[in-house]
Amino acid sequence: MLKIGVLVSGGGTNLQAIIDNIESGYISKAEIVTVISSNPNAYALERAKKHNINAVCIRKHDYADFDGYMKAMENHIDSCGVELIVLAGFMTVLSKEFTEKYKNKIINIHPALIPSFCGDGFYGLKVHEAVLKKGVKITGATAHFVNDETDGGPIILQKAVAVEDNDTPEILQKRVMEQAEWKILPEAIKLISEGKITVSGNKVRRI
Ligand code: GRF
C-alpha cells in the first residue's frame, strides 16, 4: 500500500475527495497515514478526525526559523513512512531542499490549466478572478509534481471546465473543484499507487 501524507490549510474538500475514493475502493493501493495542516482551524483537520486519520498541525510560526519548520515537517513525514506527499489546498511555501529531498514524490492540485493562471500569487479565488478578468471560455485544474518552481513541476493530469457568462469567482471555483479538482487529484494518486506513470525530465508518461 502506498503511504500518503496529505498537506492542507483550509476547507479540505480535496482531502475529502481522496478519503471518499479510498473508502469506496476506487483507490485500493494507497492509504492516508497522516494529514498535516498549516492552520489549526482548518476544517480539513475535522474531516481527518471524522475518518480516524492521524492529523497534526505544524505551524511555521511555532518555529524559530523557516528551516526549523521544514525540519519539523520532514521529521513528521519520515516518521510516518510517507511515500507520496499530496498538497491539497496547502498554502505554505516549501523550501527548495524539501522539494529536492522528495523529488517526484510531491504532487499538487492547481485550480487552473497550467501554464495559464499559475505561479506566484495565483492561488484560491485569485486564480478564478484572473480567469474571469481575462475572459477565457475554458479553464480547469491541473495535477502536477512539485519542484522548486511554483506550479512548475511535471504535469500528471488536467481536466477542462467551461466558464459560464454569469460566473462569479466563487461559482467558478466551485465548478472547477466539483468537475475537475475532486476528480483528477484522486485519479493521479490512483495512477501513482498502481505504478502506472513514469516521469522523465519534465514529462509524465502512462505505462
Ligand atoms: C481551493 O482554492 C482549491 O481550488 C485549491 O485549494 C483551495 C482549497 O481547497 N486546490 P480545499 O477545499 O482545502 O481542498
Image (spheres, rainbow, N blue to C red):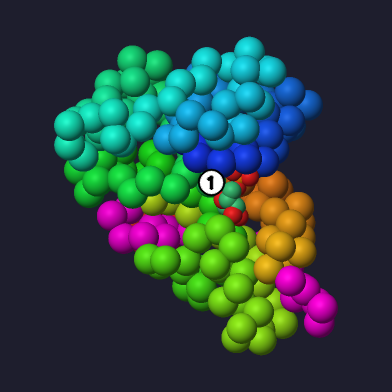
187 or 199: nearer the eye?
187
Q: Position of residue 112 (x, y in %)?
A: 58, 66
The front one of 30 and 44 is 44
Q: Main secondary structure of the magenta part?
A: loop
Where residue 40 appears, as percent x and y from the top left, is 48, 29
- For the question of whether residue 125 can be seen, the reply is yes
Whether residue 139 sits left or right of residue 38 in the image: it is right
Task: State yes or no: residue 167 in magenta.
Answer: yes
Task: Give the magenta-colored segment's residue range.
Answer: 147-168
Give the percent coordinates (x, y) of residue 104: 37, 44
Residue 23 position by quadrant:
top right
Query: Is the shortest distance between ligand 1 and the CB of mark 1 under 8 Å?
Result: yes
Residue at 51%, 75% (x, y): give it: 116
Give the camera-side residue of 166 and 196: 166
The crowd level at tag 1 (other Cα within 10 Å; few <14, some 14-19, many 20+) is many
Q: Determine the secondary structure under disc 1.
A: loop
Image quarter hosting the N terminus: top right
Q: Which residue is mark 1?
A: 89
